[in-house]
Image (tube, grey):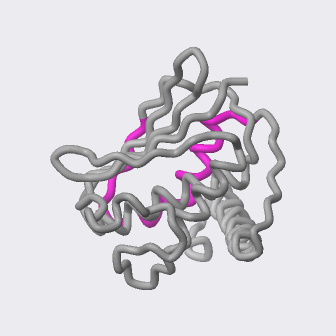
C-alpha cells in the first residue's frame, strides 16, 4: 500500500503505522517470553485513553475494512488512566483482533468507554458467534482455545495478566442475541 501511494503525507502515515506494528510485534514476542517465565514489567503513567484507542484502531483499520467489519466507538470517558500504554494497546489490539476473527466477515465491533465514581471502563463487544459454552469459564486460562486456526490459547491469558498487572479487572459476558463483550475496569486517577 505504501509503495503505491503517491501522496507523501499518506506514505508518512503508513510508515508510522508500520513502525508501530514492528514495535507491537517486538513487544508481543517479549510479552510471550515474560508470560512463559512468569515475569512482569509494566510502567504505569497517565495516558489518554482516547489516544490509545485511536492508535490501536489505526493498526486494525485495514484488516477491519478487508473483512467488512465496522468498528464503532462510544466514548463517554475521554480522560486519562494510569497504564502502560504499550501493554494496554496490546490488550485492545488482541481483543479486537479476536473479535474480528470470531466474526470473520460482515459484522460489528463496538468499543465503549464510560466511568462511575471510582473506575474508568473500557468495553469491547462484538456480534460474532459468542464464546463456546465449554470454554466460557476458562477463557483466560493458558492454552484454552476454541479451535481458532493458528491459535495458541495464550492471547487471552496474556490479556488477563496485563490487566491484573494494572490492578484492574476484566470480565467477559455474552451479548444477546449473540456475541461477546469484554469489560475492563481501571481505578480513576
Q: Does residue 89 appear to the left or right of 62 in the view shown?
A: right
As drawn, 162 above or below 77:
below
The image position of residue 76, as x and y in percent, is: 48, 23
**In this picture, which residue range is highlighted in magenta?**
47-73
As drawn, 163 above or below 145:
above
Quarter of the image with the C terminus is top right
Q: Does residue 19 appear to the left or right of 109 in the view shown?
A: right
Question: Closest to the observer: 168 or 74?
Answer: 168
Q: Is residue 7 magenta?
A: no
Quarter of the image with the N terminus is bottom right
Q: Is residue 68 magenta?
A: yes
Q: Quadrant of residue 106?
A: bottom left
The image position of residue 113, as x and y in percent, is: 49, 31
As drawn, 59 above or below 168:
below
Residue at the image position 46 percent from the left and 41 percent from the top: 183
Residue at the image position 69 percent from the left and 65 percent from the top: 24
Name the residue at the top extreme. Answer: 117
Predominant SS along the magenta part? helix
The image position of residue 77, as x and y in percent, is: 55, 25
Amino acid at each position: 500500500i505504501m509503495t503505491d501511494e503517491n501522496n507523501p503525507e499518506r506514505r508518512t502515515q503508513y510508515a508510522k503505522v508500520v513502525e508501530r506494528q514492528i514495535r507491537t510485534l517486538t513487544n508481543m514476542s517479549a510479552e510471550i517470553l515474560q508470560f512463559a517465565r512468569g515475569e512482569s514489567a509494566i510502567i504505569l503513567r497517565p495516558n489518554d485513553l482516547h489516544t490509545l484507542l485511536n492508535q490501536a484502531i489505526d493498526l486494525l483499520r485495514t484488516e477491519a475494512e478487508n473483512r467488512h467489519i465496522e468498528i464503532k466507538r462510544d466514548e463517554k470517558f475521554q480522560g486519562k488512566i494510569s497504564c502502560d500504554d504499550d501493554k494496554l494497546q496490546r490488550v485492545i489490539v488482541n481483543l479486537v483482533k479476536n473479535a474480528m476473527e470470531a466474526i470473520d466477515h460482515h459484522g460489528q465491533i463496538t468499543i465503549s468507554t464510560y466511568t462511575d465514581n471510582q473506575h474508568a471502563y473500557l468495553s469491547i463487544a462484538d456480534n460474532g458467534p459468542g464464546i463456546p459454552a465449554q470454554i466460557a469459564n476458562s477463557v483466560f486460562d493458558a492454552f484454552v482455545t476454541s479451535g481458532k486456526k493458528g491459535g495458541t490459547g495464550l492471547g487471552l491469558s496474556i490479556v488477563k495478566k496485563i490487566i491484573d498487572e494494572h490492578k484492574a479487572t476484566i470480565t467477559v459476558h455474552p451479548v444477546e442475541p449473540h456475541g461477546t463483550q469484554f469489560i475492563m475496569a481501571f481505578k480513576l486517577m
